[in-house]
Amino acid sequence: MQYDYLIVGSGLFGAVFAERAAAHGKKCLVIEKRNHIAGNIYTEKIEDIDVHRYGAHIFHTSNRAVWKYVNRFAEFNRFVNSPVANYRGEIYNLPFNMNTFAQMFHIATPDEASDVLARQRSEIKGEPQNLEEQAISLVGRDIYTKLIKGYTEKQWGRDCKDLPAFIIKRLPVRLTYDNNYFNDRFQGIPEDGYTAMIEKMLGDTEVRLDTDYFSDRDGFSALAKKVIYTGPIDAFFDYKFGKLEYRSLRFETEVLDQPNYQGNAVVNYTDRTPDYTRIIEHKHFNFGTQPKTVITREYPTEWQSGLEPYYPINDERNGALYEKYRAEAEKLPNVVFGGRLGQYRYFDMDKVIESAAELCRKEFGEALE
Ligand code: FAD
Ligand code: UDP
């Protein structure tokens, strides 16, 4: 065997594992079917601006070891995600905080906001049964109607009454004037982009681009003692139990001959129209002052073969199907399934690193040290 590990996929999971493996003297081969490294956190320069090709990525974590780890491979800037919502031209701050309540209810103090929220929340009696009820019981009907309903239905392609409550639970609701979208202790964007960070993690590890594992799976597998597979788990088993479903996204990117289009990195469009959910203006992630600007409109779409699978759909059918594949995976001692596709989980980047670190603990006896 030429290699200790064959790593399928050069995304964050594969790169963290490759970095740790190399640090423990292991020899790895990374194969990647795309023509670039970094998976979905890939950034590329357009007009000297780091453009997030597969959607905006903000690094945030409360895990000090993870933060310390990523800072070895990138200098992080002071970016704090503070998206703005545009509902039919009306502008509101997100996440739901005193700025939003002042704009929506024309009040000024936390007590006044609490009174309005309590009145509006009381519409829901008992445990919320779906996303609509959960949203109203968190922030009341006015905010639900203007800032949640349209956005969520576009994002998920389903009525809010048919969506699970948990999707919305993670949005912060605050009685302070704090527009930070995340509650995490650490946050930022790599100053030179995520691609450079992944490049550093991969270091001297051999990487073959434009190389699909399935073009010669037996040949590739024979090269290494163990396979770390970060592609879709159902594809690995030739979809023998059926296909897992995803939500996909379509990105429309435009270069504009003006320095500042929307004054913020992220503007959410929270009504049913337009069809896109948000516009990203990439330069604002890095406080850019370039003469031009690059914007991306993000359109959610139903996933089908050939499209990128972005968000796993955590409903009963897909959950049960994933369990079947996971049981098959457990029977293969020399293949590890990792990352958001291998584990069919919506993982933020810090969770991907934690999950890769957990694997490193098993393989090398230590995690990120
Ligand atoms: P991936 O990045 O998907 O890497 C898997 C790699 O495997 C890919 O490069 C793929 O091409 C390759 N591959 C698959 N099959 C094969 C094969 N057969 N042969 C060879 N190679 C193969 N997280 C945050 O923390 N903050 C954010 O702001 C954030 N924003 C997001 C926005 C969007 C729109 C999306 C979809 C996700 C966002 N995330 C965010 C999550 C983040 O993208 C993931 O946590 C992370 O990219 C997962 O890394 P991964 O290595 O598991 O998967
Ligand atoms: N959401 C919303 N309005 C917004 C932003 C988010 O209703 O302006 C809802 C929507 O249902 C979304 C969920 O909150 O799916 C989680 O939002 P988050 O920004 O965490 O989702 P992401 O797109 O990052 O997965």
Image: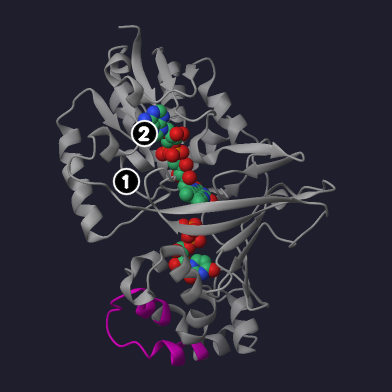
**Could you tell me residue 195's position as x and y percent?**
59, 33
Q: Quadrant of residue 315?
A: bottom left
Residue 230, disc? 2
Q: Earlier in the sequence, mark 2 or mark 1?
A: 2
Q: Does the magenta portion include 134?
A: yes
Residue in view at x 56 percent, y 63 percent? 276
Residue in view at x 28 percent, y 48 percent? 244
**Which residue occupies the extreme top position in the image?**
1
Q: Quadrant of residue 190?
A: top right
Rendered-image quadrant of the C terminus: top left
Residue 95 as seen in the image, left or right of residue 92? left
The residue that disc 1 covers is: 344
Relative depth, front residue between 99 and 202: 202
Which residue type carries mark 1? Tyr
**Could you tell me residue 57's position as x and y percent?**
56, 48
Other-residue count near label 2 (Cα within 10 Å), few / some / many at <14 / 14–19 / ≥20:
many
Q: Which region of the structure is painted magenta?
A: 116-136
Measured in 3D between alpha carbons, the distance from the residue under mark 2 to the one under mark 1, in whole angstroms, is: 10 Å
Please count the marks in the image: 2
Q: Does the magenta portion include 122?
A: yes
Residue 79 as seen in the image, left or right of residue 330? right
Which residue type carries mark 2? Thr
Residue in view at x 36 percent, y 35 percent? 231
Q: Quadrant of ligand 1?
A: top left
**Could you tell me residue 267's position as x and y percent?**
64, 64
Residue 195 as seen in the image, left or right of residue 23? right
Other-residue count near label 1 (Cα within 10 Å), few / some / many at <14 / 14–19 / ≥20:
many
Q: Is 203 rendered above or below residue 88? A: above
- Helix, strand or loop at mark 2: loop
Relative depth, front residue between 139 and 174: 139
Q: Is 286 rendered above or below residue 15? A: below
Whether the residue carrying mark 2 lies under 8 Å from ligand 1 is answered with yes
